[in-house]
Image: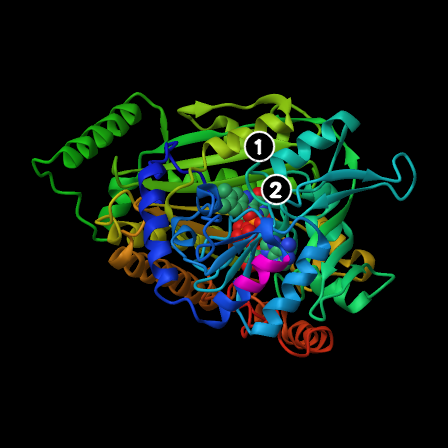
Amino acid sequence: MRVLSLFRVVLPLAIASRSQAQSRDQAILSDPDTACHNACRALKSSLATQTYHALTPDSVPAPDLVSSFFAIQQREIIPACWLTPLSAQDVSTAINILKEYGCHFAVKSGGHGASMGMSSSEGGVTIDMRMFDAVEILEAGKEGERARIGTGGRWGEVYKKLEPYRKTVIGGRDPRVGVGGFLLGGGISFISRRYGWALDNVVNYEVIIANGSISQISQATAPDLYWALRGGGNNFGIVTHFDLATYPLTQAWGGYNFYLLSDIPSRLSSLSIPPTPFTFTTSSLVQQVGNFVNWGACKLGYCTTITDWLNAYLSILEKEQYDIDTQVIAGIAYSSDLDIYIACANPIHAKAVPNPRAFAAFKKLPHVYSSNRIANYSTFHKELHDWNADGYRQFWATLTIKPNSTLMQNLISIFIQESQSLKQVKNVLPSFVFQAITADEILHMSRNGGNSLGLSDSDAPILTYSFTILYSKIEGGGGGEDRVIQEGGRRIVERSERVAKEMGLWHPFIYLNYADISQDVFSSYGTENHRKLKEVQKKWDPEGVFGKRLQPGGFKV
Ligand SMILES: Cc1cc2nc3c(=O)[nH]c(=O)nc-3n(C[C@H](O)[C@H](O)[C@H](O)COP(=O)(O)OP(=O)(O)OC[C@H]3O[C@@H](n4cnc5c(N)ncnc54)[C@H](O)[C@@H]3O)c2cc1C
């Protein structure tokens, strides 16, 4: 899950997308004879109303095809054409045309993949699955009841469509995240401790495989491909529908809690980082005000320390083991605009028990904001969305560790050092979260023949330490900053991994849905699982249609 971004953002997209559309048209018109333009013409003649190709006068891309990507880097990619298929048959036709012309492509569901080109195709065909947004209950009331969900839906809409049945599924916590990418990479929901990760709740996939056929893939029909799709990302086909187990819709207790920190000045000085110098600029003045408010709040007793906050989180990890309905995400964010660090804890109790015992240590910490209450899940999803601004450039990465106070203190020091080294980048907002992967979640991973992630319950508890760096909101203006941020982000991964390894507390798992594109996700599943994934791919996709050759974006097996 994405950590909090501190401010909600109103997107200044109108002007930017117009100028982007103009430059897109110029780029396309200047190079009309590539394989992909020919493929686009063929797509236009077979799937006329679904193809948006600048060489045909009636089809300039609708602007929201571009703005529906979460990260600005993805919006900047210029495809030869867009396709918004209406049916599985359309996807099959498209795959056959793309193979015939040797044109590369990308598949997009909700567009929340953070890296450039993950679900957008430079000079190729971006297949936007948005029209597959139907939700249907199959075999209602019977033992095999399941919800058939189109890959192009967003989780908020999916839950809304299931509400009249008083049912829910294991899906995303942010309502704008897409169904497809979330389910193919893993899927941690608010209720995963009780019911498992989302990928372990898929009982059937409707997939267009490499030979263009429309296949129903389940443990009964094709156990090897079914296993590979559970964690294998976009490497095995284009999924049009997922059948998911259903569960009763309930209420929950939880919310957001924010803590100001009193020990940042001493931490900075122990890391030999001098305080930010004052200059006569507006941003410097705002920073001084931020620091002054933080100082004043601490004087009035509203602050805690990183150590107390961390101990509260670690105490939950112990107690969490005994309460399968408790989940807490905890993290720290740095606002360069205000020059302050803020800690956060985001608890959920799935049985709607107020202030569960596991959260007691956090309850004792002085906080500056708390929204804990009993509410419908839709309220918690909306709240999470409100703290996750889109329209920024993004860097995401993750690693997995065993919980340990000294290690986590070290990781926080690395985070503080590196976030200070990035603060010259405008609007930079680095943050991290710890999230437990518990034994009860992992036990679900052996259901129906298991998934490909390679986790065993003897590994638990482990923690994902994932961080995001939000920065410039300007389209086309990321240039040099992208490099600085990527280098900084990758340095955090590399330094954190090194420390965790030295302390014998590193775990190899890299969670695909939070990973940076440079991370070797599939090796992290273990040698045997990686080998098996390659073997399944060779069997079902001998020409490598969904591999690097025609679909270069995303994580490759
Ligand atoms: C604000 C925010 C909150 C998040 N919260 C959570 C969370 O609570 N829990 C969690 O586990 N993760 C979370 N994530 C991570 C999220 O699950 C991943 O970013 C996921 O990939 C998004 O899926 P998407 O369909 O929106 O993305 P897309 O960018 O559309 O797709 C991501 C990848 O999946 C591939 N893909 C998509 N659809 C298909 C398909 N039908 N067939 C084949 N390949 C396909 C794409 O090609 C791409 O490589 C969050 C991300 C964000 C930005």
Q: Amino acid at mark 2?
A: Gly
- Provide residue 380's location: percent of width, then percent of height: 58, 29
Which residue does the numbered mark 1 point to in the structure image? 381
Other residues around mark 2 within 10 Å, as few (<14) / some (14–19) / many (≥20): many
Look at the image and tell me whether residue 1 can be seen.
Answer: no
In the figure, 509 relative to 266: above or below?
A: below
What residue do we see at 34% from left, 23% from top? 301
In the rendered structure, the answer to whether residue 459 lies left or right of residue 386 reads right
Whether disc 2's CB lies below 8 Å from ligand 1 is answered: yes
What secondary structure is the stretch in magenta mostly built from? Answer: helix
- Provide residue 170's location: percent of width, then percent of height: 70, 42
In the rendered structure, the answer to whether residue 123 lies left or right of residue 42 reads left
What residue do we see at 41% from left, 57% from top? 77
Which residue does the numbered mark 2 point to in the structure image? 172
In the rendered structure, the answer to whether residue 534 lies left or right of residue 222 reads left
Q: Earlier in the sequence, mark 1 or mark 2?
A: 2
Q: Give the structural element (helix, strand or loop) at label 2.
A: loop
Q: Give the structural element (helix, strand or loop) at label 1.
A: helix
Which residue range is magenta in the image?
41-46
Q: Which mark is residue 356?
A: none
Q: Amino acid at mark 1?
A: His
In the depicted view, which residue is nearer to us: 455 or 176? 176
Would you say residue 55 sits in the magenta stretch? no
